Structures are given as structure tokens and as C-alpha cells.
Image: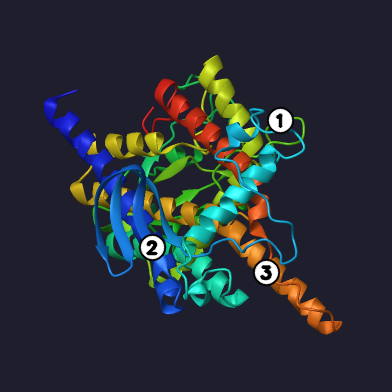
Amino acid sequence: MSVESVLLYVLGVLVIVIGLAVSIGLHEIGHLLPAKLFGVRVTQYMIGFGPTILSRKRGETEYGLKAIPLGGFIAMSGMYPPKRPGGAPREASTGFLQALSGDEPREKRPSGITSMIQEAREASAETIVQGEEHRTFYQLPVWKRIVIMVGGPAMNLVLGFVFYAIVMVGFGVAQPGLTVSSVNECVVASDSAQTDCTDDDPIAPGAEAGVLPGDEIVAIDGDQAVDWDQVSGVIRGAAGRTIALDVLRDGEPLTLQVTPLLTERAVVGDDDAVVTDADGDVVTQEVGFVGITPQYEVVQQPITEVPAAVGENVERVVHLILNLPQRLVDVAQAAFGGGERDPDGPISVVGVGRFAGEIAALDTIPVADKVSAMLGILASLNVALFVFNLVPLMPLDGGHVAGAVWEGVRRFFAKLFGRPDPGPVDTAKVIPLTFVVVILLGGMSALLIYADLVNPISLFG
């Protein structure tokens, strides 16, 4: 690899890292703006984790950048409500491990879980300024808390729309056109590894009819050709029947007579993957076959196509999350057993960076295509952040939303049946679960990073 390629590779990685950091920063602004609007006291707005590199305090809020730009947060006053009135006050230990160390008599020492909950409450209480108790997060109406917590993922969704719009409307999307790219010389079985034709192989219908690479299809079977899906649809349904194929060759119109051959082909799903049955066997169907493939061309899309693209991306991420345990098992087997990585499986930010680097280092595609690919990666990342952050588990935004919704449900039924207001939901009680989720997320990240280092997914083999 030349020095120029290395520099371009590094540039591609930096573009994604900076783009991800900006996306995270805007995610946190999605939380910050409604929090400020609703009067909540926000003490910190930070991009990244770890040691603070630089910060500046404006008003009551400290704005800063930390060493690891792979996350962010805002600190709001009173994230957790105090213990219910009437509960017996207890002293909190100085740490989770000390709570289990045996320094206090067993009858007085709180359990490790209780200690974690108490520490969360105390840390939350320390953020409340005397006389400004009304500016706490937990005292907001339920709908305002939901708006604040959904604001971050919503910002990522907006960014996903923006990036997809730039890619699809501004640059365009590669799709099959009506110009023939290649013509098969013969017909071979779909599951055959054969690469060369033999005397025993029948001539492909396209080659027999005289179709040549570069021919532009203008009509098929008497109908004007609109797109490749229409052309291939007519061919699949015309097995054994001779149809007219009108083409332009070097600007001159030409009508060819082609008879699609009835052949058995693998069924391909909407995700372009081969469909298999319950036993893992490839599902096939009998269709007409001519043996021509189209050239791909970049076509600008109407803005109305953007929501569908975002929706498909959301669907893919949801499917990935729902099948995450099995996907992680597959990643572990590939990382430690040397198997092949699933190109549609989960990857870490390291893997995303490798994708960006490979794209930037390519000297076979124009700069515009590289920029489009980078923006496409950032679009997918933001959609993934949108979906992932709405998972209803603390410390994710969806966990806070779930807590607020549950509180609203409890208060609604209490009011409906004339019962006393049950008060805010004590979300501090799920701190132990939060601790477990953080450990699991950390382990998942470590596994994916390791896999992306030792057995990465490559865009170009």
C-alpha cells in the first residue's frame, strides 16, 4: 500500500470518528435544549468519556470535551427521586465493594444492591440546589421527561434523514439500468462452480439472439422498457415463448427475437440474500432465463424515497437487536474459531472505521462516490443510534422513557379509582440492572472490537 493510500485510509477513519463525535454531540443537544426549555438545572454537557480535555462554564452549565469521543451525556439536577416519605433513613457506604467488605456489623451494613441504590439517590440529591427543588428532572410532568429523553434519539433520526437525503437526492443511488453489461455465453446450473463453457452446455438465449454488451433495451415484448425490474419480470414469466427485445446499438434501433429458457434458479429475498428452508437448503423456483446482466448507474432519487430508505434501515437494526444474542455467538465463533464473519452482522466502531478507510483508499472510484459512501455510513450510524437508544433498559434513553411511562400509567389508574397519588417511580431501584446492562454492553463492545481486529469484515474481500 502506497503512502498516499495509507493517508487516505487514515483520513477515512478520521472522517467517521469526527462524524460520530458530532452525531453524539447533537444527540446530547437533543436532550439539552428541551431540558433548558423546561427549566431543568443542567450542570454538565459533555462529549466523550474519561478525563476532561477542555471545558468552559457558561451560566450554570459546564460544556466540555472528554478524551474518548465515543459517547456523551448531560447531567441534570434530580435525575432520581428521593426515597418515599416515611421510609427509614439509612447511611450509605462509601462504595459498592466496601459495602460487601464486612467493615460494619451485618445487622447494620446495607447490602451491595441497597448501597448502589442509596449512592445513586445521594448523588442525585447532591445536584439539587437549595431553593431550586422545582428545577429537578423527576418533578417534571411525565410528558416533559419523555420529550427530554426522546430528544436525543430524535436528533439522530433527523440526522439519518438528512444524510440519506444528501446521498439519495444529491449524489444518487446505484441501481441497474437498461444498458446490457454482459451476456452469458452458455447456461450452467445455478449451484455449479463452473466458470467456463463446454461443448455440452447449451447456448444462453441472449447470446443466441445476438444481444451484445452495450445494447440499450428500449422495449420488451411490445412494451416500453421502464426499468430493469420490469425487463427481468417479463423474462422470468416468458419461459419457452419467443418475445421481441428492442434495443439501441450504437444509436441504431434493432429488434431481436429471444426465447427465455426455463431454468431453476435460487430464490433471492428483499435483502438480496439467498432464501433457505427450515433444513438450510436453498429454495429454488423455475423461471425464464436469458443470460444478460445490466450495467449499474447512479440515479438521483426523489425526496419521497428517503423515508422508505430510513424505514428499511430501522427495520434492519431492530432485527439485528432482536437476534443479537445469536449474532454475538456467531461473532465469537468467527473471532476465536477463525470462521467467516457475517457481513450483515454487528460490528464495532473499529469495524466501521475500517470500512471508511477502505473506501477512502480506493483509487478506482471517483471522489464523489467516496463522499457519498461516507455520508451513507454516517446515515446508518445515526439510525442505529436512534433505535439502540430507545431500547427500554437503563442507562439508555429508552429506560428513562419506560420509567416515565410507567409512572404515568400508575398515576392515571390511581386517579381513575380515586386513590392517592403514588408519586414518582423510584428509578434508582433499577440501578443494579443498569450496572448489569453496562457490563454486558462493555463485554459486547470488547468482543466486537476484538473480532474487528483479528477477523474483520472487509468490503472488498
Answer whether residue 242 is visible to the viewer in this image.
no
Q: In the image, is residue 152 above or below residue 347? A: below
Task: Judge from the rendering whether residue 63 lies leftward or rightward of residue 77; answer left or right.
Answer: left
Q: Position of residue 393 (x, y in %)?
A: 63, 52
The disc labelled 2 sits on which kind of residue? Thr
Residue, disc 1: 281
Q: Residue furthest right?
A: 417
User: For the C terminus, which image quadrant?
Assistant: top left
Residue with the mark numbered 3: 424
Amino acid under disc 3: Pro
Disc 1 crowd rating (10 Å Cα; few below 14, some 14-19, many 20+) is few
Residue 157 - label: none
Which one is in front, 271 or 79?
A: 79
Mark 2 lies on a secondary structure that is strand
Residues at marks 3 and 1, CA–CA distance in whole angstroms: 54 Å
Report the label total.
3
The chosen color scheme is rainbow
Q: Give the residue number, with chain letter if any, for mark 2.
A: 43
